[in-house]
Image (cartoon, helix red, strand yellow):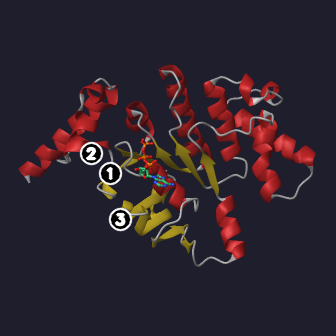
Amino acid sequence: MADKNNIALSVRDVHVQFGDHVVLHDLDLDVYAGEILGFVGGSGTGKSVLMRAVLGLNQRQKGQIKFFGHDIDAADNDTRLAIDMRMGVLFQHGALFSSLTVAENIEVPMHEYLSMPKSLMRELALLKMELVGLKRSDAHKMPSELSGGMIKRAAFARALALDPSIVFLDEPTSGLDPIGAAEFDALIAKLRDTLGLTVYMVTHDLDSLFSVTDRIAVLGQKKVIAVGDLEYMLAQDDPWIQSYFKGERARTIPAFDKAQRKMQSNNSQLASQ
Ligand SMILES: Nc1ncnc2c1ncn2[C@@H]1O[C@H](COP(=O)(O)OP(=O)(O)OP(=O)(O)O)[C@@H](O)[C@H]1O
């Protein structure tokens, strides 16, 4: 469960621009160890840019990023390597290598970071497959033979290859049907609970946000404009947050009513004090 005193990822004053186009300006964010943080924002607001900057895949002009207390810019090579090994990433479309089998894809990070016999890597890959709900018999399949849901699961297994402490999921349920998406949400929650993972999840999926996240961070106006649970979001005046979290689509989700009632009860308690 989320531990507020243990910050897995701390982002301070991050600034990213491309030419004259400022995408992120003085952005701050904390992700608590053991929480599932949902990250939302309008299209083109910079969610992917931030995730890539945090992962060191995008240049940033300014700002500090700390993983588990370690400033990544100040870290020596050994510390940087140790930090890299504690992170797993699931890119939006799975990004499996099309010429490798499922098991070989999962073994890629092991080849990169670990020194162990191939047979052991295969055994570990098979265990990761079971963890995400794939069958051992899927190990030799090529990505082109997999359904959308299986591709996501295989990519998730690859993200878990090195037993990370934090995983970054970019739109994990996009392209899945509602049942497949709900199953994937349940998998994320189960793995957080069983492995004690910290999950940073960029998503547009309201069902996911409402069902599995502990907190939600909203990106707008080049920074994080709100972070909190669903009740907190429902109490915000910001027009984008209002329309996103209280729009017609949101009202059809069962968790909406519960959060709305909780927010109203919080408000009346405050009023009576
Ligand atoms: N390498 C790049 N060079 C120039 N501009 C870029 C680059 N990467 C991203 N951008 C710009 O940064 C802005 C934010 O893009 P980003 O992909 O992070 O948005 P997003 O919030 O993830 O959007 P969506 O929800 O639609 O995926 C966009 O205007 C995009 O054009």
Place of residue 158 in the rendered image (x, y in percent of width and height, measured from the top left): 70, 43
- With 237 as the anchor, is 233 left or right in this view? right
Q: Name the residue under label 1.
A: 228
Quote the CA–CA distance across marks 2 and 3: 22 Å
Q: Which residue is drawn at 69% across and 40% down?
A: 157
* 95 relative position to 210: left or right: right
Name the spot of residue 142 as percent of width and height, x first: 78, 29
**The CB of the residue at mark 1 lies under 8 Å from ligand 1:** no
140 relative to 266, above or below = above
Whichever of labels 2 and 3 marks the residue nearer the N terminus, that label is: 3
Q: Distance between the residues labelled 3 and 1?
A: 20 Å
Amino acid type assigned to the residue bearing label 1 in the image: Gly
Residue 140, x across and y down, in percent: 83, 29
Q: Are marks 2 and 1 in contact (CB under 8 Å)?
A: yes
The residue furthest front is: 19
> Residue placed at 70% from the left, 24% from the top?
146
Residue 178 seen by the camera: yes
Mark 3, residue position? 25
Q: Which of marks 2 and 3 is in front?
A: 3
Under tag 3, what secondary structure? strand
Residue 126 visible in image: no
Which residue is denoted by mark 2 in the rendering?
A: 233
Secondary structure state at the residue bearing disc 2: helix
* Foreground residue among 162 and 6: 162
Amino acid type at image mark 3: His
